[in-house]
Image (spheres, rainbow, N blue to C red):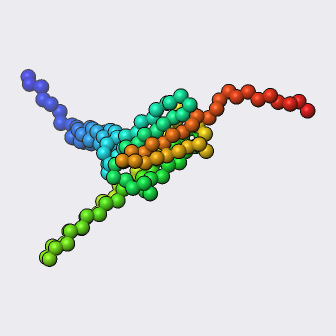
Amino acid sequence: MKAVARYDPFEEIRKLQREMDELFSSWFEKRMEPREWGTAVPAIDVVDEGDAIKVIADMPGVDKKDISVKVDRDVVEISAERKEAKEDKKKDYYYCERSYSSYKRVFRLPEEIDPESAEAEYKNGVLYITLKKKEQGRRKEIKIK
């Protein structure tokens, strides 16, 4: 006697659900990885230099005026916008294209810093932020009243 496979009307739905789960999973994984401008976040290096922490961010094509840096005790927030417009006018031809990209990156530092001593410099498409570490373990003698 031959075994007959039973028809399961929900098998096609489960197969479609697995395919959709796989599609969305791979889409979200790709979105979480740093990539080039326009799709995700530029690369950032955080370097401990002993008495200071240096943050180096690659930001090609961004005007200095379009960059914002905010620092707190142990948090850095970098946001930027990049706008570009191309226009070509000829006798019977007109071409105009605009693009806009922005991002905001917030990350925690390995140690507390002194926000008042923070300095930033932007040159050749690279942002350099120097953050002096907060002095730790300073002893203070308290007078008894």
Nearer to the camera, 14 or 115: 115
Furthest toward the right, the residue is 145
Residue in the image at 25% along x and 64% along y: 86
Note whether 83 is above or below 119 in the view shown: below
Furthest toward the bottom, the residue is 91
Residue 51 in the image: x percent, y percent? 56, 31
Residue 116 in the image: x percent, y percent? 61, 44
Residue in the image at 31% along x and 42% along y: 35
Residue 61 in the image: x percent, y percent? 33, 52
Furthest toward the left, the residue is 1
In this rendering, position of residue 111 left or right of residue 5 = right
Residue 104 at least partly seen:
no
Residue in the image at 86% along x and 30% along y: 143
In this rendering, position of residue 51 left or right of residue 79 = right
Residue 52 in the image: x percent, y percent? 54, 34
Note whether 64 is above or below 54 in the view shown: below
The quadrant of the rendering that contains the C terminus is: top right
In this rendering, position of residue 87 left or right of residue 72 = left
Note whether 46 is above or below 90 in the view shown: above
Nearer to the camera, 57 or 76: 57
Nearer to the camera, 63 or 4: 63
The quadrant of the rendering that contains the N terminus is: top left
Residue 52 at least partly seen:
yes
Residue in the image at 14% along x and 77% along y: 91
Quadrant of residue 11 in the image? top left
Q: Total label count?
A: 0
